[in-house]
Image (cartoon, rainbow, N blue to C red):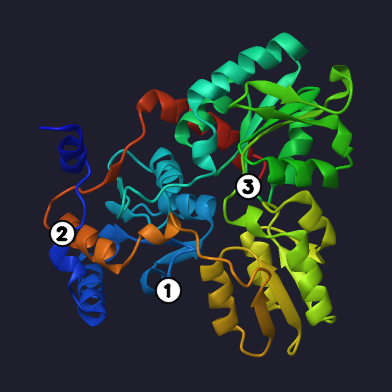
């Protein structure tokens, strides 16, 4: 058996027959399994999922909210996470031993999370401790692998979300003189800037070059940013903002803090996915908005708010490719396999990694 066959046996993929089914048949199959399994099944869906999938979600939200809801759901034996790999890992860490977390397509990953692996992080930590001594506390965005969360938890750090990043960074500075922020440099930079830390006191660690880039003397560095980013949000540009200002002078620009600093600086509002959703929902009738976030969500907000003029900040933006791996054929197959007693694409975090990752998550949740 070759490597590919081994991987396919361990993480089976959707049979061809599901890809040949009509949308109507797939929807009927998904609904039927949900009705038959009842409370034994919980299906959380991330805001960035396709409409064909999110329509079946028992709960919608960001990654951490969905993981928490999964943990609170004591009745569910099977949790089929419609999101990406790191989200399902977090759900597995927070849920009970007798609950099983599934990911309909194991290819549904996150490019940002993949930009910081454990080996790179351990090398960086060793180098940074040599430079700064025991003055650094690590923080990681929840958009990171379980292994990175575990590293942070092991070193007394915590996880952060885009909505509580300022609170957690403020907490971190009460513990140590400096922070290492993984893996999204833009969220780290925007958060620190909002807290009054000058840009020239923020350094960037390049894991590929294994080098720290800084514009001030080492002793003045306060924030060390990991050179990672969201492949979707980094595609919103200053040019996009200027074009909207020229074409629609009265339109407001709202973006996610995973966008570049210069884009956030030019925008009217910046905040988490939930912040964007609530801002648009509560905006006055007839107001106009250009939204800088994932396209599936923007399109959904357009449909759900017909009384407002809403566009994507970048008209050429595509949906998150890895998030879009979860589709109706994968969902229908996964649910039917689970109902038949099979265990396709189980997400199970190593116990030691889960233990340390839980420390990082708990430090954040204790301050929620």
Which quadrant would the N terminus be assigned to in this image?
top left
| Pair 1/3: label in front | 1
> Which residue lies at the image location 62% right of the left edge and 61% below the top edge?
273
- Residue to which mark 1 is pinned: 51
Query: Would residue 144 be seen by someone viewing this image from the given angle?
Result: no
Q: CA distance from mark 3 to mark 2?
A: 36 Å
Helix, strand or loop under label 2 = loop
> Which residue lies at the image location 71% right of the left edge and 9% below the top edge?
130
- Residue to which mark 3 is pinned: 161
How many residues crowd mark 2 within 10 Å: few (<14), some (14–19), many (20+)? few
Residue 14: assigned label: none
How many residues crowd mark 1 within 10 Å: few (<14), some (14–19), many (20+)? some
Helix, strand or loop under label 1 = helix
Is 65 drawn above or below residue 132 in the view shown?
below
How many residues crowd mark 3 within 10 Å: few (<14), some (14–19), many (20+)? many
Helix, strand or loop under label 3 = loop
């Amino acid at each position: 058996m070759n490597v590919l066959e081994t991987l396919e046996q361990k993480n089976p993929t959707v049979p061809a027959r599901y890809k040949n089914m009509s949308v109507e048949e797939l929807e009927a199959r998904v609904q039927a399994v949900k009705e038959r399994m009842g409370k034994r099944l919980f299906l959380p869906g991330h805001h960035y999922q396709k409409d064909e999938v999110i329509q079946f979600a028992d709960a919608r939200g960001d990654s951490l909210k969905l993981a928490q809801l999964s943990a609170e759901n004591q009745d569910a034996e099977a949790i089929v996470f419609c999101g990406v790999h790191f989200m399902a890992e977090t759900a597995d860490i927070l849920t009970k031993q007798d609950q099983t977390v599934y990911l309909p397509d194991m290819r549904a990953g996150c490019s940002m999370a993949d930009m910081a692996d454990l080996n790179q992080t351990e090398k960086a930590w060793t180098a940074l401790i040599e430079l700064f001594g025991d003055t650094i506390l690590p923080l990681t965005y929840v958009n990171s692998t379980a292994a990175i969360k575990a590293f942070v938890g092991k070193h007394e750090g915590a996880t952060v979300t885009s909505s509580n990043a300022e609170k957690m960074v403020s907490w971190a500075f009460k513990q140590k003189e400096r922070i290492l922020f993984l893996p999204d440099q833009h969220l780290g930079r925007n958060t620190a800037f909002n807290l009054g830390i000058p840009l020239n006191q923020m350094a960037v660690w390049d894991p590929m070059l294994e080098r720290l880039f800084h514009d001030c003397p080492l002793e003045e560095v306060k924030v060390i940013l990991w050179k990672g980013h969201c492949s979707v949000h980094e595609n919103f540009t200053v040019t996009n903002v200027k074009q909207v200002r020229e074409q629609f002078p009265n339109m407001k620009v709202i973006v996610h803090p995973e966008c570049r600093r210069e884009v956030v600086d030019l925008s009217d509002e910046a905040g988490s996915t939930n912040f964007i959703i609530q801002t648009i929902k509560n905006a006055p009738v007839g107001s106009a908005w250009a939204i800088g976030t994932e396209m599936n969500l923007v399109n959904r907000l357009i449909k759900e708010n017909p009384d407002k003029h809403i566009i994507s900040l970048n008209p050429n933006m595509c949906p998150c490719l890895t998030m879009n791996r979860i589709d109706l054929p994968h969902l229908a197959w996964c649910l039917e396999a689970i109902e038949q007693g099979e265990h396709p694409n189980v997400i199970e975090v190593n116990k030691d990694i889960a233990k340390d990752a839980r420390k990082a998550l708990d430090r954040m949740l204790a301050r929620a």
